[in-house]
Image (cartoon, rainbow, N blue to C red):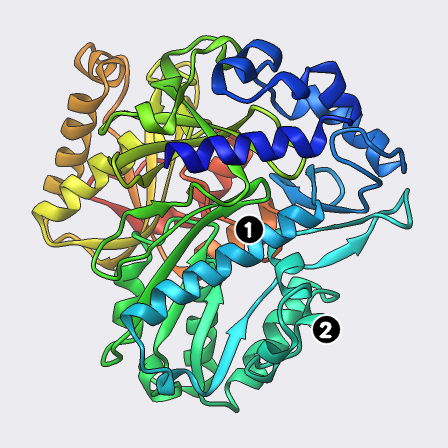
Amino acid sequence: MKEAQLANLRSIMAHNKATEFGKAHQFNRITRLEHLKHYVPIQDYDDIYALIERMKAGEPDILLQGVIKDYAVSAGTTGNGKHIPLSKDRITSDQRFMRMVSMSYLAQRPNIMPFLGTHVSLPGAIDQHDEFPEVHLGEISGYLAKHSPKWLSIFQVRPPEKMIKESFEEKFEKGLEEALKNDVRQITAIPSWMLKFFQKALEKTGKSTIKDVWPNLKLLICGGEALTTYKPHFRKLCEGLDLDFIENYGASEGYFAFSDDLDYEDLKLVTDNGIFYEWIPNPNEVEDLKKAETVPTWEVEPNTPYAMVVTNNSGLYRYVLNDLIEFTDIDSPRIRVLGRMSDMLDQHGEAVEGWEAEKALNYASGKQNASYSIFTVGSSLDDGNSLPRHHWFIQWVTPPQDERQFVKDVDEKLGELNRHYFNRRQSEAMEEPCFYSLNKDIIQKWKDEYFNLGAQTKTPKMINDKEQLNGLRELSKDHQMGVDKVS
């Protein structure tokens, strides 16, 4: 693993040493991590924004060799998101990653007969840039679909080359219409889209389970969102089917890990595919991540939250991501995604992180054999006569029988995990949290009103926007759990 990582680093440096960035940061001298740390500071998107704008304008040899015309959109809509350059090497690495996923699965399920039917996917759109006509912007799933082997289209419910030019609504409706006419064996999508796809299929057909709609459905491939919280919901909707699940962990910045063992929920970190990793331990305790000390993959420790810093073959050098990672195995590295560093409620000094909220929720749910698919939390202070309080919104698969005890358990467990929250609750500086049950209609109405509709629209774990929170509270006011209702 160490040798593979250093080989990645040397290849990236050698390939881009003649670029403007490579010359400025002495890529020709970098062969080890110590060199990389010395010559290249930790970067975020703001640091390279101006360089990427020049690249989109057609300037060559800036972050990557040559002129780059394709960009993956990250963390926003096509117009205003982060635009990550896509090199030919990056596309090749992504294709290799997908082959690894396929080969790993086939090694566990060598009988391919169950998959000789229709496959459904929803790749993101690829659009022409408004200002630079030769530049294309899109979701990384769209680029993967564009460059996928032609023979794969034989199995697709609709041609990928058509779907990458369509809006989300058009893709969804046409895809569902065609899927309902076919013997679907495999579906690839982000979990929230897949959930909606199943729900709409049952509505349109009047069937009670997905098995009645697609009796030979075998494999669900998910990415873009954590799969674990959706699994119970999928299993309930697909009752009677012997389903396999594969989770890919990737982003516009690269594909990093996948579930290579169907019996486990942690993911295999891919260390030999065009990405060199560094890790910042306990990043939320670091005042300035750009000044943080990093460790290589071969020096990480288990049960420690890390921020990921990547140097890749697509023009990102010591680029810090927003995800929190925990290693479950350090010898043959395996990881679990804890959440995002920006998943935090801190309007009232409680500093509650998304992974802490999820741990508390899982603890309380486990005590009552309850299960959920989606949750989100916001914090409010309604007026000068009230106190701050948290508002939890949960879509249940199996709700808790004792709602009052459930509320108490979440509140107490979160206090155990987070001393800031504990202190504020103990000192009565925060009120007891409120809980609401979500359903798909509430979620959809909320997203339609407050979010840009698209294939990658996700339910955030933390709501830090006051209007978004108040909107969801209003939609959920008749579904409050376990405590007296509040306005």
- Residue drawn at x 21%, y 27% is 414
Report the residue marked by disc 1.
457
> Residue 205 is drawn in which quadrant?
bottom left
Label 2 and label 1: CA atoms lie apart by 21 Å
Quadrant of the rendering where the C terminus is positioned: top left
- Residue drawn at x 57%, y 79% is 156
Report the residue marked by disc 2.
162
Give the tally of numbered discs.
2
* Image side of residue 24 versus residue 467, left or right: right
Q: Position of residue 182 (x, y in %)?
A: 50, 90
Is residue 337 visible to us here? yes
Query: Which is closer to the viewer, label 2 or label 1?
Result: 2
Q: Position of residue 437 (x, y in %)?
A: 31, 51
Q: Which of the marked residues, 2 or 1, is nearer the chain's N terminus?
A: 2
Quadrant of the rendering where the N terminus is positioned: top left
- Residue drawn at x 60%, y 35% is 11
| Secondary-structure class at tag 1 | loop
**Viewer-closest of 453 and 476:** 453
> Residue 64 is drawn in which quadrant?
top right
Mark 2 neighbour class, 10 Å CA radius: few under 14, some 14 to 19, many 20 or more: few
**Residue type indicated by callout 2:** Lys
Q: Is residue 169 placed above or below 327 in the rendered structure?
A: below
Mark 1 neighbour class, 10 Å CA radius: few under 14, some 14 to 19, many 20 or more: some
| Secondary-structure class at tag 2 | helix
Q: Which mark is residue 50?
A: none
- Residue drawn at x 24%, y 46% is 481
